[in-house]
Image (cartoon, coloured by chain):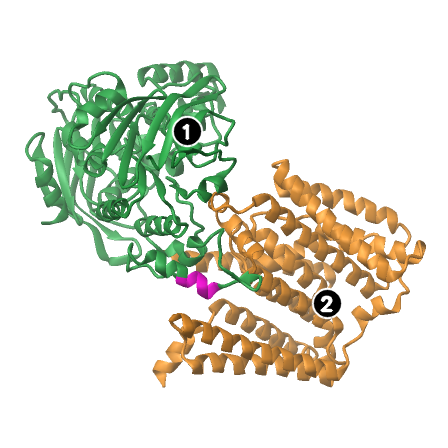
Amino acid sequence: MALLALQNIVKDFPGVRALNGVSIDVQARQIHALVGENGAGKSTLIKIIGGVYPHGSYGGRVLIDGQEARFHNVHDSERVQVQIIHQELSLVNQMTVAENICLGSEPMRGGIIDFTAMRLRAKEALTSLSDSISPDDRIADLTIGQQQIVEIAKALSRKARIIVFDEPTAALPERDVAHLLTVIKSLRNEGLGIIYISHKLNEVIALADVISVLRNGERVSTFVRDKVSIPDMVRDMVGRSLDTVYPALKAAGGDTVLSLDRVSLPHPENPGRMIVKEISFACNRGEIVGIAGLLGSGRTALLSLLFGTFRGSYSGSLRFEGEPYRPANPNDAIGRGISLVTEDRKRYGLIDAGDVQENLHISSLGRFCSNGIINNAKSFAECQGYVKKLSIKTPSLNFPVKNLSGGNQQKVIVGRFLMTNPKLLLLDDPTRGVDVGAKYELYRLIEQLAESGMGIIFVSSELPEVLGISHRVIVLHQGTIAAEFSHGGKNEEEVLALAAGV
Amino acid sequence: MKQNLILLWKSLNKRTLFMLGLVLTIWVVFNALSGGYILRPENLSNLFRQVTVVAILACAMTLVIVAGHIDLSVGSALGMFGALTAAFITQLHINPVVAVILILALGFSVGCLHGAMTYYLNMPAFVVTLGGLIAYRGITQYVARESIPLRTEWIKAIAQKSIPDWLGIALLAVIILSLAYGIWRKRSEHRNAGLTLDPLWIDITKLIFTSAMVALLAAVLLTGDGIPIELVMFVTIALIFSFVATHTRFGHYVYAIGGNKQAAFYSGISIAKNTVLTFGLMGLLGAVAGIVTIAELNAAAPDIGDLKELEAIGACVIGGASLSGGSGVIGMSVLGALIMASIKNGMSMLGIVAQMQKVILGTLLVVAVALDQWSRRSKKSG
């Protein structure tokens, strides 16, 4: 008997049917992974399971242990031991680990909170999960990996039997990912039913017992472990075969657009430490240079140097199109023809309250202005052009950008910087959180840009894409270049070893 | 010995120490500048009376700010409650006890109304209470268009009298014994649960030091006019609210909501109930402050309470509360109020005109918060 079963779930929103008769079940001692593009219906499904969308707002039935369950709110789902671990961690930063683990269900004694019992309960919940976290630590002082463990401890202390993980490794550094997956496996072994949602297909294949693919609000297929491959999943997610995940590379080679000569970057607050040590490399017109490296290798610092956001002095020489280049801020960089598309859309990218047009033309307003007044018609035409060129799925240019899917939001940011007509484009993890179909389109776009003569520096934590898309790859390890090779020169394992300093 | 001192230093709350040190420094400096007036028992007594209204407001305002909101109506509301109390008693001849109870209930209800509008209508508290600020001032100016005298002796006594000496000493003993009991209980609970403890001598040293300071203050006051009732009043309110904030579920939830509303919601905490109650308490203390104000003035005037909300917010901010919510300590806000009141008191002693005092206070507020931000930033990057 399934721990959790969803039968024929139908959910409509104004104008769109998010779920069209989806049936899924999770057994005890099972990890059931859900994969699908953005907009396939995964988050809607989770919200129904978690009681965020109450009974009555959807069609179909939710069964727990074979009995129909009608959740009117989040409490109801928790009462039957369903816990959801959201993508944005639900922790109160200013409180301690113990306070967070017991949040909402604090032990009481004589009408007031029993802090001693609270710390004990937290200690117990943490025992099998981690020995580096103490109940009195403040959440704000923990790493993201540790915070995630605290969330799991919280779910466990509420005696969860079913846990749903929503993109848990999106923000985790590699070594914490391995630990998390081990923890999830041991939870499964203890009898829990686990739903695991992720874009990282290789993780899913390594972890899950059962994998279901959602597309356009329907469950398209379900695979059993060891009987599925990544191309199978991708094909079902996207609805067509992607023959090559990465577009074919055209030959590159042109004048040198950017060159670094023995550049060193000291740590802004700790001048004795070098984030980047004597790095030299060049990027030519029409060339895609990929930079691979683990967290702490200096790749983000390098990009921030090139875009003028690095705080602190540095040594070595930087040349752009042959001329010395010392950007003091992004304005300088954009003025010279360098643009940066960052990973963190929310913080560094999107203007949340704005619409598509605003977010697109904001860095290029100078071109559309005469006497300081914006010529809306001119900007409109050009923005329309980019929407078409990038295949941004939006009902109109005035559509609020925060309602777009992650992949389309990323395209808007890319569009914004393309509009500045850069000669060198810097990309920092541009496909983070973007689904497979949109990723492929981004890769093709990057390839086209290179073909048209733009120099591109591509930084990413996903080794396969760095290796697949670049003409040349530079591997960084703790601030120095561990290797430099042309496309196809090394495989993933070799690069990982070099990046890890092995 | 050095090891021990380091341990002791580590166990201390730096911010509390800093604020206390600041208060004492202000007293000492102004005392020197004014030729010894500040530290006289009569002046200290006055000072504690002067800080009472803002201190009371700051207790509830801290919770409002921690919840991520703000209440701008407090000064006007205070005025309205004071005016209505005077009107009830003097003009409508309602029994003073009944009048006070009615006003307190009204205060709580008005506060709950603010909370309900903020939550259910999904409006920024800023806007809701801004409307209140304007409206309640109008009511105050109407009700008290001609000043209403207050003749009820026991209410006036709150502001003007001191508690009997024996009671003062008794309360002092109660405070010290409660502190000792609290330490003993915490230690035995921790020991039974197998959790780590500070060494006993550290707890004892802290206890002796705190008791000595409180006793010294009481002694100084006793040599003058005695311990003012208002002092006992705001200290009691501060202690109760501190306890509620740290030990009750409600208080805990206010911090959770302010820290991460979504996390609180998903943990099953009722945002509605706790928001309404937070504002309700603010309204309640606003009513208390209104009554204390007319007790101080012996009358209700149309401008009572003017700008008091800003002083209350200033006190909380100096005390370290973050305007984005999630952090703030009531005791610190009260100390913040004391710092502001001490500076005002000092400036008055030096003969600085009221207008100039405002300039100085405004500047100091900005400087204090800027320093605070700077120290937080350097702590983070380390």
Residue A89 is situated, as x and y percent measured from the top left of the image, at 39, 44
Among the 4 quarters of the image, the one containing residue A16 = top left
Among the 4 quarters of the image, the one containing residue B160 = bottom right
Residue A373 in sight in this render: yes
In the picture of the structure, the residue carrying the numbered disc 1 is A44
Labelled pair 1, 2 in contact (Cβ < 8 Å)? no
Q: Chain of mark 1?
A: A
Residue B288 is situated, as x and y percent measured from the top left of the image, at 75, 59
Residue A410 is situated, as x and y percent measured from the top left of the image, at 34, 28
Which range is magenta? Answer: A115-120
The CA span between labels 1 and 2 is: 57 Å
* Letter of the chain in orange: B
Please tell me whether mark 2 sits on a helix, a strand or a loop.
Answer: helix
In the picture of the structure, the residue carrying the numbered disc 2 is B50
Residue under the image location 52 percent in, 35 percent down: A72
Identify residue type, mark 1.
Thr
Identify residue type, mark 2.
Gln
